[in-house]
Image (tube, coloured by chain):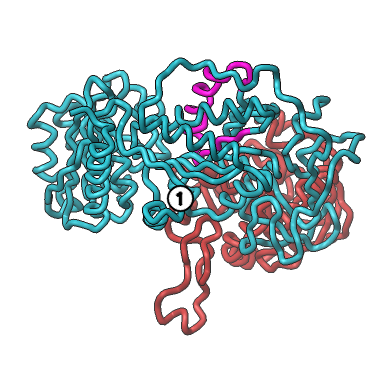
Amino acid sequence: MTNFSFFSGRELTDEEIPTISDLHLFAARPGLSDLPHCHRCGNTSTFSSHPCARCGKRCTYCRNCIEMGKISSCTTLYRWTGPEPEHPEKAGTLHWSGILSTGQKTASDNVWRAIQNGSEHTIWAVAGAGKTEVLFEGIAAALSDGKRVCIAAPRADVVRELAPRLEKVFPDTSPAALYGGSPDRHIYSPLVISTTHQLFRFYEAFDVMIVDEVDAFPYTFDQSLQYAVQKARKPDSSLIYLTATPETSWQSEIQSGRRDATLIPARYHRKPLPVPNMVWCGNWKKSIVPASVLNWVKEKEKEKALIFYPHIDTMNKALPIFKNINPRIESVHAADPLRKEKVEAMRRGDVPILLTTTILERGVTFPGIDVAVVGSEDRVFTESALVQIAGRAGRSADCPTGNIVFFHYGKTGAMVRAIKQINEMNTLGQKRGLLDP
Amino acid sequence: MSQCLLCENDTAVQSWRGFFGAKAPVLCNICLNQFEKIDGPTCEVCSRPMDQKGICPDCAAWEKNIFISNQSLYHYNEAMKALIARFKYRGDYALAEMFAEDVRAMAKKAACDLVCAVPLPPSRLAERRFNQSEALIEMAGLPHTPLLARHESDKQSKKSRAERIEAEQTFYPIGNAAGKSILVIDDIYTTGATIRLVAEALGQAGAVSVKSITIARSGS
């Protein structure tokens, strides 16, 4: 690795840094402080220790970020203190000819302003509003000013989906996509698209930090990922949050004006969001496929539908019953080795109905589908999960409607709030003239 | 509160048994259920799962040696593979705790004079920062007698089956085991080549018999 630009903004362990003679260009600090506190991931609670063959002492190590390489008492973290690499010429030239919707335009202006001012801003955009496009102008300006930009997302799928889109609009910059095992991991780029996990390896690197799906697992549950985002941005950087379904505390902060935010309540295609219906289906844990669900599937000879189940085991029991209706019906879950293939088959239309756990609640778009949730009262179906799930329907301009049913064995607050949120968005979209009559 | 070693679930003993000092389990049930203990009939020598008790063809083919038998705890399924990788290569020493009780009980049953680890070559030990075999012994609370050391060599796990069986001796004795029976504890039993080389080197140290306990039995 003769190209030092790679090290810019990164903080790496002694084992990740190859033997180099120019160590005076690096600042060093111990991997753990005495508390103990892991300097890479911020963990202060999950440690263990053992007699260490490397340093000869009993060494404490961090169990939280160990999958990224071990940080022990005898680990040193190094970071580059040399000059930052220059951006390629025309780095900030935007190659995009799309047109922003009225809602997107306001959001785009606000993102641009936050980036200019080094401040914080949240974009709350409904599923299908087109929140990625809202970033383009701001990123272009930042890159032109020589700023380094990061878009962080909690899941690798999202990073893999975003990277080619940004590559297309910023071809002179060639963004680096970072996730576990990614081919770009040894590359320097002024535009980085990364999982929040990979940010553990950065230190005060970015002038603009954008966090996508800020309400998604595991980001909201894992304090160390939030630590990683803070550590990776420069002290005087701007911070942009993107979400379709902010958690309740954020919603009230936004509504009371305590959190600076832009709301895009309508989809790009200017049709209202389809609103879910609630249907009582009895004890689905016993019936597995309640009669009302069977009827729903049969009645319209559903061409394309997603059916959500709360757990893998009930979904697996349900699959043979659905296969009796149509043998091409499939199921998918997080650990399914054929997950990608099945999603592709659904997209091609080879699979008419896909049973799924919450893994397909966000990020996937199938045009013209209907959506059912079986056992929607289960606690895995939070308000935001249900809004996201409902957001799968009516995505394409050709087919902006869709039938969404929450099949339940007792209404929950989450179900009621999810429907309320969708209705409020439609009302707001109407009021602001973002919907076609 | 006690936390599962592999996830964030609480494993505290909920009933009155906790009050009488029952220890919280190391793993929660969900994590524990991913691992399969070996319980059916196995080869009497190497613990390979078989249709009926007996001696498997591989063990029958090995030359006579002071190695008597191996006993393995778990099948080497995907979950166990991931666990051992995290333990050995990532270096998560704490994971050895989930085997401590079983290893202790099996060691007692094996009734050997001394317990010895499989040594690592010096460079690999420095890289990994601990020897997984010693970690298993320490966590089980057994006294460890270092009887062997090891020359630098290529990684065993990168070798093919044939290469392993033909493997050269890299272990050499550094202690005295005259007239003793030895128990060796290690992470995986694959072809049995390693343990037989270990037994040979222990024989040079004077040992009369060798048994082994391994966490997983990798099928081949």
Q: Is residue A159 above or below residue A36?
A: above
Q: Nearer the viewer, residue A36 or A244?
A: A244
Question: Which residue does the image show at 39% across and 34% down from the upper left?
Answer: A363
* Residue A390 screen position, x and y as percent: 26, 39
Q: Quadrant of the C terminus of chain B?
A: top right
* Residue B140 screen position, x and y as percent: 65, 65
* Residue A251 screen position, x and y as percent: 37, 53
Question: Which residue does the image show at 69% across and 29% down from the upper left?
Answer: A146
Question: Which residue does the image show at 72% across and 37% down from the upper left?
Answer: B156
Question: Which residue does the image show at 48% across and 33% down from the upper left?
Answer: A109
Give left or right: position of B41 versus B164. left
Q: Secondary structure at mark 1?
A: loop
Instruction: Give the residues in magenta.
Output: A149-174
Return the chain for callout 1: B
Q: Is residue A32 above or below residue A150?
A: below
Q: Is residue B77 above or below residue A48?
A: above
Give left or right: position of A35 versus A347. right
Question: Dot 1, crowdedness within 10 Å: few (<14), some or many (≥20)?
Answer: few
State which chain is coloured cyan. A
* Residue B112 screen position, x and y as percent: 70, 64
**How many marks overall?**
1
Give left or right: position of A332 versus B63. left
Q: Nearer the viewer, residue A344 or A244?
A: A244
Q: Is residue A65 above or below residue B181?
A: above
Q: Amino acid at mark 1?
A: Gln
Asked whether residue A242 appears in the rendered view, the answer is yes
Residue that numbered label 1 is attached to: B34
State which chain is coloured red. B
